[in-house]
Amino acid sequence: MIPTEFAYLAPTSIEDALAALAEHGDDAKIIAGGQSLLPVLRMRLNAPEMVIDLGKIDSLRGVRDDGDAIVIGAMTTHHDVLHDPLVAEHAALITKAVEHLADAQIRHRGTFGGALAHADPAGDLGAPTLALGAEFVIAGPGGTRSVTAEDFFVDLFETAIGEDEILTEIRVPKHTGWGAHYEKFVRVVHQWPIVAVAAAIRSDGSTISEAKIGLTNMGNTAVRARATEAGLAGAEVSEEGVRAACDRAAEGTNPPSDLNGGADYRRHLATVITRRAVLKAARG
Amino acid sequence: MTKIELTVDGASVFDDVEPRMLLVQYLREKLGKTGTVIGCDTSNCGACTVHLNGRSVKSCNVLAVQADGAEVTTVEGLAQDGKLHQVQESFRECHGLQCGFCTPGMIMQTIDLLNENPHPTEEEVRLGLEGNLCRCTGYHNIVKSVLHAADQAEGAHA
Amino acid sequence: MTTTQERPAEQADREIGKDRRRKEDQRLITGRTRWTDNITLPGMLHLAMVRSPHAHAHVTSISTDAAKASRNVVTVLTGADLAETQGVLINAWAITTDQVTPTHLPVAIDRVAFAGEVVAVVVARSAAEARDAAELVDVEYDLLPAALDLKEAAAATPENGGALAHPDLGTNKSALWIFDSATAGTGGDVDAAIEKARGDGIVIEREYRQQRLIPAFMEPRSTVVDPTGEQITMWSATQIPHILRFALAATTGVPESKIRVIAPDVGGGFGGKLQTTPEEWIVFAVARRLGKPVKFTETRSESLMTGHHGRDQWQKLTLSAEKDGSVTGLKVELLADLGSHVSLVGGGVPVLGAFMFNSIYKFPAYQFNCQTVLTNKTWTDAYRGAGRPEATYAIERLMDELAVEVGVDPFVIREQNWITHEEFPFTTVAGLEYDSGNYEAATAKAKEVFGYDELRAEQKQRRASGDQVQLGIGISTFTEMCGLAPSRVLGSLNYGAGGWEHASVRMLATGKVEVVTGASAHGQGHETAFSQIVADRLGVPFEDVEVLHGDTQIAHKGLDTYGSRSLVVGGEALVLAVDKVIERAKPLAAHLLEASVDDMEFSQGRFSVKGTDQGLGIAEVAMAAFAAHNYPEGTEPGIDAEATYDPVNFNYPHGTHLCAMEVDTETGAVKMRKYVCCDDIGNIINPMIVEGQVHGGLVQGIAQALWEEAVYDDAGTLVSGSFVDYLLPTAADTISFEVEHTTSPALTNTLGTKGVGEAGTIASTPAVVNAVVDAIRHFGINDIQMPCTPERVWKAIHAKDGAGDKPTEGAAMPHFSESEPGTDSTEGAAQ
């Protein structure tokens, strides 16, 4: 319940944060909202010598409109993302995913960038950002670079963020007018999803023209259900219309087996949950 | 050690703390605010819920140093001039507690929930308390307490 | 014959039956609480435990040098260091005279028998520094084969090479406990009944699993010991301060009179704090050794891993019946997992169920045998209901199976076999005498409120249309034995103590009343309910009564709180004490009024002289007793009284519970739609508190049916070792319940009350599982193992499609394993 000893810095600019990272290297750990990091530290599963808090860098907070994308600052809390009108209008899938992410207290404190950088395959933000083709802006000693969602999620708890780098913002291409739904399958609500599906659907209400689907906890990272996406183009918005495409949702996935279900069961669930998510997204 | 300065239940406090000290430990061990309790180590139970700058947080999931400059309210800071907060009253009125260990967290989360949504449905109440575990009440009377508090507040404003 | 009454309306002049708001709440809702972990004493030292990550191993070496050199560490102690003073943990209930009981040391010395067992203790000036140093203790282990699977452990012998939990004992079998109605003279020969039914009747054979559960009280256990006074004072988050004091004295050599135990505010127990723990013994020993106050508070992970677990049985059941569904016999063969040691009353838990498998039914023949088995898992003991939920589950599941076999509604089978209200008092095939009950009345009310017929119609319709969401209705008509317990009965079962309770009533000079009870509340609301009893009987204002408990110096005598006993045993002691006060006050009142004792009447708090308007209030009499200026010759100046009550029988609450579950056949997800219960717990002191007890009990029982399970991996590590994986339900996972009552007063106590603390838990589990099975029975399913996870349900439905029928056994979700699994930490999860 008590973390190991560490030193603490709370820089007020990205530059200072990067400098601190450069100085302390491997021994440092970044804390954003801390909602995943602090449990790890309390249980002594990680023992950094230095914790660098991004909480005092105001420029990392907030959501802005940037033409064909909206930009979410990495330190924007889930609660602020949830209630942001720009996100709701142009990236409703993210609003839907954040709505049931963890619980109210965690959403008040946890941050959008922090959760993504933690890269828990059962986290709720990987699938929607992947589905919407978000870009991750990462600052490092040599300036900033941008990484696609495909490249950002590398493996279990591993992202493209280098040891000397900081995730600063997430650019989400606008999906204005798209239907969206995030369907989560859990045994009790405070659980990480056993499987969840993020579906963004462009349709006229009766026929789907385009579908973007991300799967949560169906592999070591969030994954796109590409076969389903392809199959849904032109599909009728009905149980039977989307069934065949959704039955392919688990293709190419490598889900875990744990107390909540085996890989086979998860593959099955993915198809059902995808069908439900797609129909809810399409029907609004 | 890091110097911190914050307001807790209306009083200014200054301290030197180890950076690893959790806010809940700071409240309990340094300030004697033992009304806020620790029920788990994975941030599931919500027993340690307090308000940080007006929003509910799990105080086991915040470092004391991160609360530097902040305003913290605990269950001990709710009653004003000896008068209980309506949510405290409602928990007593509706028997929303038995052993009382989860109660400070439940009350603090309820106040946050009602601040955001003053007229919740039963389902909204249940979802709004998803971050707080109780082992005694089966939640039935906790939900009733929250709905009662909402009704009372409405009555007071009518 | 039981005549069931309408529940009496609240009477203005009666305290009993009022929905009094709780006296306890003021401090709990304002945070002015006294949890053990709140206590800080001057110079207090803190402990951290070094625990074995292995289920079974020899401890080959312990190096404490680095830890001792760590900042602000006072000392590091191993089992060898503490060997002379640490005492042992006791088993108070050897269920047979030949029970095999391994020695249970607080700190293991050369061998550990479960993952989480303490091997060394760090003492430091702060809890953080103690934990830091604990990481530096280097323990080497030589792994031994671990006995983990209950059935395999039961079969293991030195000859067949099966793993033994304690190799020196030569067996994992601890005790075989048998009840046979033919031998006891309470019924016929069950084997003959089964044999006959195999020819011309019905035989139902099933095997049910009672999965391992964790009590998971919200307040982690904490202990503080202050050795600096004349008495050594221990504060502990316990249900049993009195038993704890006795056991400390009995095993450490410290005279009982030199020990004071205080259970301050205690945050739930559910049987989980009905224990004497290694940690309590360790804190006691260290404080004595160092002469300083010492505190230890467990983390949640430590609590889940090392606090005792509950349930964990395999139940093999054979029910025989006539073709028409009249039951002719029941045979129960149990394997019960004790875990690593025989805990305080752990071996007796299945025995508490032994008398309950026949439940509310008139079975002509009954046989029960239970083999308790040692394994290398966390020790087990009481968890809410203790033995009775297991029994109720088995019989209520079986009655549903019998109904299917006969082809009738499950209520028909129950009605056909239950004891009718005309037949009370009734001596059961297990030898208990049920004093009162009315199963017909409770069932009729529950069915009506539930809308039973409408829901059956909807179920039929959904089934016919092949709806993706199927509806099931589950019934549980339960009874239980509670109010533990008549001391002679406990003696006959070889239990180490009695089952009486003590109370005293102190009439203060100012008219206030101090009541002391030997029961030890931890959320039940004793302060309120006991105040109501005293106020009602003594005729004083509710507000004037103060109830004290949980401190052996204040409540010098008591047997604490468990087994739904506080009201029905402790409350009855209180009634006796109050009556003694009135009897003692009567001559004094007569003396003061210059009247004859025979002319005195007592009513509504006032003594009066028959046929006159002369009288004195009880407060005036108390003042006169205090002043002692004028009292009858040959009497003592005082009207305080105390009483010890030993119950003459258990008592037998009962009820009918009805549950509607929806099953999503595509995913296997189950969802509760409606839950109605009608419980008969006799007279009710405080209906609000009673309903709260029922709600909480229901959710714990429902949680066994649907969510909770303590799972171990092949190495004997607890996989569900945090709240991330041990799934307690939240508000969003549960629904609002409809709780009704019928009233058949108990005939064996003055107040006519029956216990309610465990009723909801005992009744609800089979109601839920019966509903789940009922929803999908048409897929050819007759059982789902608990907890009914979506995967289990889905696999059962799709077994024929090749989904397989084995539930997945796997690891926990890895959310906190940022670093590689296996990261060193001796805290919490043993990884």
Image (cartoon, grey):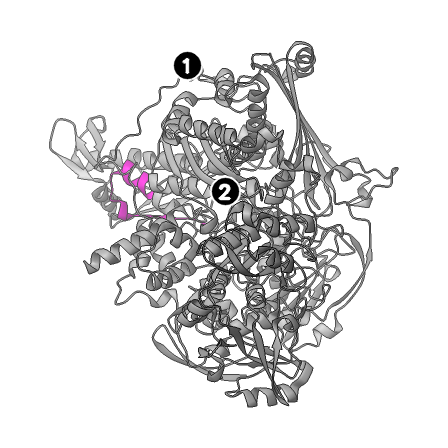
Chain letter behind tag 2: C
Residue most extreme to the right:
C159
Q: Position of residue C68 (x, y in %)?
A: 70, 73
Q: Which residue is mark 1?
A: C422
* Amino acid type of the residue that numbered disc 1 sits on in the rendered structure: Glu
Is residue C510 found left or right of C803 in the rendered image?
A: left
* Residue C821 in sight from this viewpoint: yes
Q: Position of residue A89 (x, y in %)?
A: 42, 68
Mark 1 neighbour density, 10 Å: few (under 14) some (14–19) many (20 or more): few
Q: CA distance from mark 2 to mark 1?
A: 39 Å
Tell which of C559 and B63 is nearer to you: B63
> Where residue C600 is drawn, which disc sits there?
none
Give the SS element for disc 1. Answer: helix
> How many numbered marks does the figure carry?
2
Q: Do the residues at pointers 2 and 1 share their chain?
A: yes
Q: Is C227 located above or below residue B15 in the figure?
A: above
Q: Which residue is mark 2?
A: C671
Q: Nearer the viewer, mark 2 or mark 1?
A: 2
Give the SS element for disc 2. Answer: strand
Residue drawn 62% across and 83% down? A165
Tell me the magenta residue range. C531-552
Q: Position of residue C607 (x, y in %)?
A: 20, 35
**Which quarter of the image is occupied by the N terminus of chain C?**
top left
Q: Is C826 located above or below residue C485 in the figure?
A: below
Is residue C559 rendered magenta in the image? Answer: no
Chain letter behind tag 1: C
